[in-house]
Image (spheres, coloured by chain):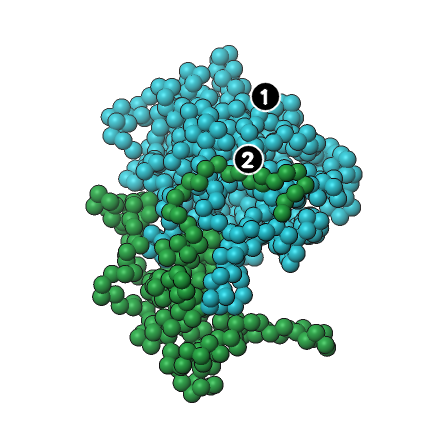
Amino acid sequence: MSGLYMLQDPLAQTYDVIVVGSGATGGWAAKQMSEAGFKVALLEAGRAVSPKEFTEHMPAYKLKYRDHSPEIARTRPVQKQCYACMEYNYEWFVNDLENPYSTPQGKPFTWQRLRILGGRSLVWGRQSYRMSDNDFKAASRDGYGDDWPISYADVAPYYDLVEKYVGITGAAEGNEMLPDGQFLPPMKMSCGEVLMRDRVKAKFGRTVTIGRAAVLTQNHNGRLGCHYCGPCERGCSTFSYFSSPFTTVKDAQASGNCTLITNAVVSHVDMDNATNKARGVTYVDRLTRQVKEIKGKSVILCAQALESTRILLNSSTREYPNGLANSSGALGHYLMDHVVGGGAYGKLPELKGKANANEPARPNGIYIPRFRNTPTSGKNSRFLRGYGFQGGAEMDFNFGAEGYGTQFKNAVKEGVYQISLGGFGESLARWDNYVEIDKDLKDAWGIPALRIAMTHGENEAALMEDAAVTAAEMLEATGAKDIKVQANVEMPGMAIHELGTARMGTDPKKSVLNTFNQTHDVKNLFVMDGASFVSSACQNPTLSMMAIAVRACANLIDRFKKSDV
Amino acid sequence: MKRRELLKAGAFAGAVAALRPPIVQAQDGKANAELTPAQSGVDASGDLAAPGWKPKFFDEHQNETLIVLSDLMIPATDTPGAKEALVNRYIDVVLAAEKPEGQQKFLNSLSFLDGESMRRYKSAFRYLKREDQDDLLHALAYPKAGSGWTGEAATSDPAHTHFEFLKQRIAGAFYSSQIGEKELGWDGAFAHGPYKGCEHAEGSHK
């Protein structure tokens, strides 16, 4: 925290809006509200981040352990389960020793978190897909669960707005399951991917499209186009992938209306019981451990789905003994995370050439939108909903070559053309996948920690079994050899797409939020991150989370104008 | 296998219990506990070639055996090999910081090699003639397949498993070294223009 903020004493005033969390959705909330003229305090649990600490251009041989650092194993054994937590950047991820959570026996859950300005937007996978009414209204179509109380038409204008600002590369396909958007020019496909696109279309009628990603293919909104160096998760010196510190948060600060308070570990929302309104939040200074209270006319939680719910559960009052805004009892329930682990990989021997270390590295792959249980495919008898595939095909060095010696050394350089598809399946919303406060566990700041209870069910397993088979079939149709299938159900959390636990709905008895992410119970309290999701769809959710947050902010701005907050 | 996966192909690095706190010397000399060494600009690429280097984990016999083995696995040809890339020293650094299970796993495989060598040649691996070392490695390098005549499935092949484990650790160390990156032809630049993708005419990808 800079000394300036201390001198100004950010706690002496009452803000119009307190935003908790500075990641993908929190950045948007801070930008939208501050640019509309409201005084915003943006609270981030971690420190600020500087481009000086980006390491995307540092070769592995400069690392002492070349990604086998004992420091990661000691302090980040959970975070290390994500590929993006590396010896380069592990300090961006939370220290697992300071940030514990518990899981029931036999129900492991991996929870990947960053506490730093920008949160997970610093290291995210950048894949950006719209949801359609096949997702928002899925329950009406197959009878499982609940519809969203909003439809595609409600969110579409905000998808447009977010995409135009963020910069999403992609190709329009007119696919019934995957609405097109405001795209920057698409990235190119490799030869193997072109083969897959044409042959899969010919044999199965399915769409193989280039990934839609929050990476600039041309200069856009003051940021430079991608220079194709590869490892986005280590930071980007040209800011070519979307991360909030260098876009939305920067804009919020430039408005003159946003006070950024870093190292503010929020423990709970403070209530004014006389008015039944939130009056602010209490946080622990991460470095000094001092407890502080900040006052606001409204509070927006964007702390990450499970963290926002944790804050509400830790905000119990006499009126709300089971957690704030939890008169429904639904808070913490319906936790979802896309199921992964089904797919296939192989080799494409018909494509010749040699591996080349000096090829531009495309930070994107291909995408196959859901083709099961669609309006045109009809109903599948074995499972509900469906899955999409991410994948790719490229010539790579053949590190798996047989033998040893000169033969091995030469074979590595010859290379091998690899092709792969990995499924991301819908995670059905179920009451018995939930989080609650573990009364016996606290984090390093004394804040009660979560107990996370989630398993993937039979439907998710059936999706991954089917994904393994269809992936193998599509690779075979492409001409792949030496195909290996994987029909696993990875532990929940592995997709890092946690959704739900404060779902939206029209019935206050069954849901936590209304259609504008406002809690049913407390008028000036909002949750604008992935916690609001009613169903998970199978698309990577961040784009939808941002669009829904911007929509909710537009509504909040209207309420402020009508003095209805 | 992608390069990133190769980096991870070795056994997951463990930790010894009594490590110093994560204080990092930043470039300006001030301690910063919240940046990784890489984020602070620390360049460890010269560490392994430091004069007077001594193994922290291996004893002399293990270290010498690994040098001989790595030189056979990835020899110098018209380009330098694993020995020149000091893969023994890098593996020593990693193992010194690894958990006892990981350390033992590596030593087990190295001992297996010496055991096979003793059984066949009555001598430790590092002292064998080059052609005997080569013969021994050849015997371990390929997995035993099942019978094509009887349809019998392949059984597990522990000898080959030890070989593969040592090979992957050596290859991981080699191709992540500066010499290894050069072996792959990397020119040292990070940007090579826009990604061009398939430039073939429609329907032609040869």
**Chain that the image shows in cyan:** A
Q: Of the residues tagged 2 and 1, which is closer to the observer?
A: 2
Q: Is residue A297 visible?
A: no
- What residue is rendered at 77% in x and 35% in y? A376
Question: What's under tag 1, amino acid-wise?
Answer: Pro
Look at 24% across and 48% down and name the residue there: B25
**Near-viewer residue (B200 or B30):** B200
Colour green, chain: B
The residue marked by circle 1 belongs to what chain?
A
Q: Which mark is residue A374?
A: none
Q: Amino acid at mark 2?
A: Met
Q: Is residue B34 left or right of residue A448?
A: left
Count how many numbered circles sit on residues in the image: 2
Callout 1: 10 Å neighbours few (<14), some, many (20+)? some
Give coordinates of residue A278: x percent, y percent. Answer: 45, 26
CA neighbours of label 2 inside 10 A, class few (<14), some (14 to 19), many (20+): many
Q: Which residue is mark 2?
A: A187
Residue shown at 33% from the left, 77% from the top: B61
- Compared to A161, does B133 lie above or below? below
Tag 2, which secondary structure? loop
* Residue occupying the point 41% across, 45% down: A93
- A172 or A417: nearer the viewer: A417
Residue A157: image tag: 1
Name the spot of residue A21 as percent of width and height, x first: 43, 33
Considering the numbered disc 1 on the image, is that residue within a helix, a strand or a loop? helix
State the residue in front, B58 or A341: B58
Closest to the observer: A294 or A373? A373
